[in-house]
Amino acid sequence: MEQEKIECFDGNSCAAHVAYALSDNSVIFPITPSSVMGELIDEWAAAGRKNIFDQVVSVTEMQSEAGAAGAVHGSLAAGALTSTYTASQGLLLMVPNMYKIAGEKLPAVFHVTARAVAGQALSIFGDHSDVMATRQTGFALLNSATVQEVMDLALVSHLAAIKVGMPFVHFFDGFRTSHEVQKVKSIPYSVMKTMVDYDAIKKFHAGCLNPEHPQMRGTSQSPDIFFALVESSNKVYQAIPDAVQAAMDQVAAYTKRPIHLFDYVGHPEATHVIVCMGAAAATCEDVANHLNAQGSKVGVLKVRLYRPWDAKAFLATLPKTATHICVLDRTKEPGSFGEPLYLDVAATIQETGESRVIIGGRFGLGSKDLTGAMAKAVFDNLASAQPKRHFTVGINDDITFTSLPLAGPLDSVPKGTVQCLIWGLGSDGTVGANKEAIKLIGSHTEQYCQGYFEYDAKKSGGLTRSHLRFGTKPINATYLVDHADYVACHHPGYVGHYHLLRDAREGSVFVLNSPWNTIELMEQNLTGDVKRDLANKKIKLYNVDAWKIAAEAKVGKFINMIMQTAFFKLSGVLPFEEAIKLLKDSVVKMYSRKGDEIVQKNINAIDLSLNAVTEIPVPAEWANAAPPKGFTIEGAPQFVNEVMLPCSHYEGAELPISTLLRNCEGGIMPTGTAAFEKRGLAVTVPKWNAEKCVQCTLCSVVCPHAVIRPFLVTPEEQKAAPQESFVCVPAKGKEFEGLHYRMQVSPLDCTGCGVCAQTCPVKALDMTPLEEERYNHKNWEYAITLPIRDDKIETTVEKPNLKASQFKQPLLEFSGACGGCGETPYIKLITQLFGDRMIVANATGCSSIWGGSAPWCPYTVNKDGHGPAWGNSLFEDNAEYGYGMFLATTQRRKRVLDIANKVVQEASTPQDVKDATQEWIINADNAQKSKMTGNALKKVLAAHQEEKGLLGELWDARDLFTKKSQWIFGGDGWAYDIGYGGLDHVLACNDDVNIFVLDTEVYSNTGGQRSKATPRGAQAKFAASGKKTSKKNLGLLAMTYGYIYVAQVAIGANQMQCLRAIQEAEAFPGPSLIVAYAPCLNHGIKGGLVNMVEEEKQAVKFGYWHLFRYNPLLAKDGKNPFSLDSPKPSGDLKDFLYREVRYDALTRQFQDEAERLHTLLAQDKQKDYERYEGFAKNGF
C-alpha cells in the first residue's frame, strides 16, 4: 500500500486534499478564512487532477453561501457526492438548507473554518460561535484540533457521511488551524479509495432524483405525520457515533494515529480535568504534561464528535478519578445559563447521579489564543477551594469580574524548539517568504515545524507578525510565540512604535532592516525600550539595509528574499549554502507566474544579500537607557488615548472591559480618529516643487489617502507659519485674488505609493526619502488649522469644477487601504462634495475594512463636527440596510415637517420663528437650501430651546433640518453577486438613494476570487484556467428600468466625467447607480499600483472600460438620456490586457485557452461599445 507523504500543509490544504478526493461536485463561495479550500479545489480541477473516482471534480462558484447551500442540496438530491467550504455568516446563510439536507438524509460534507459571527462588530477570526449556531440542524459535527487531525478527520467525515447517509460539518479553528502551517503526513488517494463503502454509494445513487425511478421530495406535511417523521430519524442518529468511530479506526489502521470520539491525555488518575474542543486542546495538553511533571494529577479530555453527543463514550473516556471538571467553550451564548459544551457535559454527569464539581468558562473569542499561562490559570482555578464558575480567561473583565488572573508567561514548549517572531509589513512579501521557509525546512530536515501568521486590519501596508517554530519534538503550542529565540523587524518605523523585544528570550538574536548600519546610527535611532531589552536580555543585534539592496536589485518594496537570506544565515535551522540553493529554487516556484524577469530580480536580491548582514555590538550602558514615554497625545479625544493608541501600538489585548465600555459600548466608535495614528511607514513621500506646479490639483484628486491637499493661504497666514519651509505661490485665477496657494503633504500619513508623482502632468512632485521630508509634518499640522476656503469657486451640477472640489475638505482621510488603491479616490471625492450630510451603508468587503476597521476611523468631520455617518451590516444585505436608513430618515423628517407646519399655523408662534420655519418648509427637499434655511431656523429657535411644546420639539429635531444624502457603497462581489437581489429591488423601489459600486472585478477583500464582474479570460481565484463567461453588465440592467440614473466612470481616465456623474447622481430625485473602475492589487498591474491612474486611462483608451451616463430627466425634456463619454477605442486590446498578470499569466499556463478567451473578450468589449454608440445616436 502506498505510503503517506510528508508535506508542509495548513489546515485548509489538508481539508481540500481530502474533499477533492471524495467529491463529485464542489460548490463554492469565498469567505475568510475558508476560501483557500475552494481556491485549491478549483486549481486542481483546472490542472486536470482526478479524484478517487477517476474523475475531475466539477467546481461551481455560486452567488452567495445561501446559493451554494441550495446547489449542494440539489446536487445531493440528484445523486452526486458534494462538498462545500464556509465559515461565520456564510455558514449561517446555509442553515435553512442544512435542515433540509439533514432531514432528507443526504451525505454532504461541509468543511468549516470556525469563525466568530458578526454581532457588535465583524471579526474574521476564529471561535466556535458559527458552528454552535448549527447544533440543531441535524448535521453531525466533527472537530479537528490540529493540522494533522484535519487531514485524518476530514477523511473520517467523508467516509462516515457516505456510510450512514447523513451530512457532516467537519470544523476546525479559523486561522489558528486553517492557516497554521505544520509538517503533516498526507494520505494518498490510492489509500482513500480502499476505504470507501461503495455499496453505500450505490444505495445513495439508487435513492436520488431520477425519472427512471421517480420520487417526490420536500413535501408539505400536516400535523398528523410531521412529528412522527421527525422522530423517525432517531435510530439513524444513534448509529452515527459507532459509524464515526469505525471510520476513525479504519483511518488509524493505516496511519497508526489512533483517534476516538473523545480522547483523554494526562495523568491516568487525574483528579482535575479540562474538557475542551479545538486547537486549544493541544495547549492544555502541553500544560497538563508540564504540571504533571511537577507532581500534579491533571488531564485534558478532547472532544472530537460533538453532535450527535455520545454520553456513553464521553463517560468511558473521562477518568473515574476526576472529581473536578472544567469545560471550556470557545463561544458565548448571551442570556444562557452556560455555553453549549458545558451544558452537554453537565447534563451528562447529572444523569449519572455522580457528585463531581463541574464548572465552565469561556475563552478564545475572535482568535484570542489560549496561551500556556491561560491554561495554567484554568487548572489553578479548578484546584482552588472555591473555583470561579462561568469565568473568562484571556481578558481583563473589571466590570462583571469573570476573568481569571494570570501568573505570568509559561513556556511549556519542548526544550530545543527554536521560536521565531518576525515583524513584517503587509505586501512586502514577508508572510509569503516565511511560509516558504517553513516548507523548505519541513521538507529538507527531520525537524517538526509550525508557522502562524497575524495580520492587522490594514490592507497592504499593515502590520504582520509571523510566528515560526522548529524542533525535534512535536509542536503543540497553538498560540503566539512569547519566548522568541529569533526576532526580526522588517521596517525601522516599528522601532519605538511597538514593543518589539517584549517576547524575546534572553540570549536571542534581533535582526533589523534599517539604514542604521553603525553603532553611532543605532545610538541615535533606537528607542530606550529596544536598547534596554537588547542589553538586559543579552540579545545579539544585527542590521541589514534591505531597502538599499531592494533598490539595487530592482524588486521595489519586496524585501522578503533579502530578509529570508538573513534568516537562514543567522537562525542555523539549515546549512547556509543548502538554504540559499533551496531559497533560489523557491523563487522560481513562487514567481514564475509573473515572468522570468521577476524571478531573476529576486535571485539577484538573494545574491546581493549574502554578505549584507552586519553585527552591531550592544553597549552595556544601554541597560539603563531611558524608557520611552507612554503612548498618549496631549489634547486628543479620550477614545484616542485610551483605546486607539494602545491598539495601534499592539497593546489592545491588555485593555480592561471598563475602558472599552466607557469608550465604545456596543462597538460604536467615534469618527475622525485615523488622523491621530501617524504611522510614518513610507520609504519615500512626495516633495512639492512650487515653481513647477500648475495648480491643477490632479495629485489631490487621485491620492488614495488624502495626504496631499491644496490650501489657499493669506499672506498673514503664510507669515505666521511655524517654518520658513511653508512656501506658497500666488494662487492662479481671478477668484483667488490676494490668496496664495500651497500643495501640502502629510509625510507621516503617506503610504509612499507614488500615484500623485506619477500622475502630475508637469512632474512637480518628486518621491523623496521620508527622513528628508519629516519636517513637513509641522507644516501639515499648521495647514489643517487654516480656514477651508471652498467658497471662492463652486462645483455644481450645471457647472462641475474639479479644482473647486479639491478645495473642499475630504472627509475620508488616512484609510487602511493599499497604497495606490483604486477605490478610495472615489469615496474621498464623494465626501468632499456631500460628506457633511452623508449617511453611508457599506457592504462588507475591502471598502468596509479600509473604512471601518476598529479602532481607527478614516471618516472624519468638518469644523462644525459634521461628517459621514457610517454603518456596516453584512455582505449580502447592504442595499436593504442602506434603504432602511433612507426610510427611517425620510419618516423622521416627515414628522419634523408636521411639527414645522403646526408651528407656522400656531397663532402664538413669534413671527420671526414663523417666517424662518416657513422658509425651511419650502426648501426642505433641497439639499443646499435646506441647510441654509435650516441654519437660519436654528438661530431663531435657540431662544426657545428650553420651551416645552412645539418649539421645543422643533429645536430637538434640528439635526434633521438639512436634507440627508443616502449612499450605499460596496464592491462588485456584493453588487454583482451576493447582494444583487437586494440592490435590484432597492433600485426598483424608485426612492432617492445613491448606490456606488467599486468594481475591482474580483472579490478583492477575500483574496481575488472571481465574481460576475470578472471579465472573460481573466485569471482569478476560483477561475484558475480563466473565466469562461462574459462580465455581467450591471449598468445596462439598471437602465432597463428607465427611471434610474446610471453612470460608469473611471476617475483616472476622465476626472471631469466622474465628477459630473457623481454630482448628477446625487441631485437626481430618485435612485442612482454609479459603477466605478477600481484597479486593484489583485490585478497584478506591471510596475505596481503606482500606475493606477495610467491603468484607468489605458482601460478607456483600448475600450476595456467604457464611460457613459444615463439620466432619465433628459428623456422628460425630450432629449437623449444616454451620453457616451468614452472615445472610440484604439489599439489592440491585448496590449492592454498583458499589462496585468491576471491576463498575462494565463498565456503561460493555458496558452491556447488564453488565446481563445482573450479573442472573445475583445469581441465582448467591441460589442459593448457598439451598443453604447447606438444608444448615443438613437436613444436608449
Image (cartoon, rainbow, N blue to C red):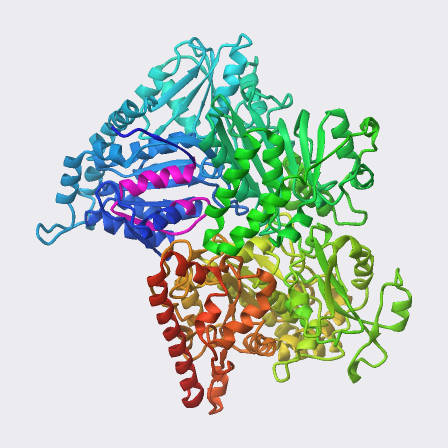
Q: Is residue 146 left or right of residue 745?
A: left
Residue 17 among magenta residues: yes
Which residue is at the front of the view, 920 or 926? 926
The image quadrant that residue 464 belongs to is top right
Residue 230 visible, this angle:
yes
Q: Is residue 164 left or right of residue 1175?
A: left
Quarter holding the C terminus is bottom left
Magenta stretch bounds: 9-37
Percent position of residue 490, x then y: 65, 42
The image quadrant that residue 1058 belongs to is bottom right
Q: Is residue 315 above or below residue 679?
A: above
Residue 992 visible, this angle:
no
Percent position of residue 666, x then y: 59, 46
Q: Is residue 214 left or right of residue 620?
A: left
Residue 502 among magenta residues: no
Quarter holding the N terminus is top left
Percent position of residue 867, x then y: 66, 62
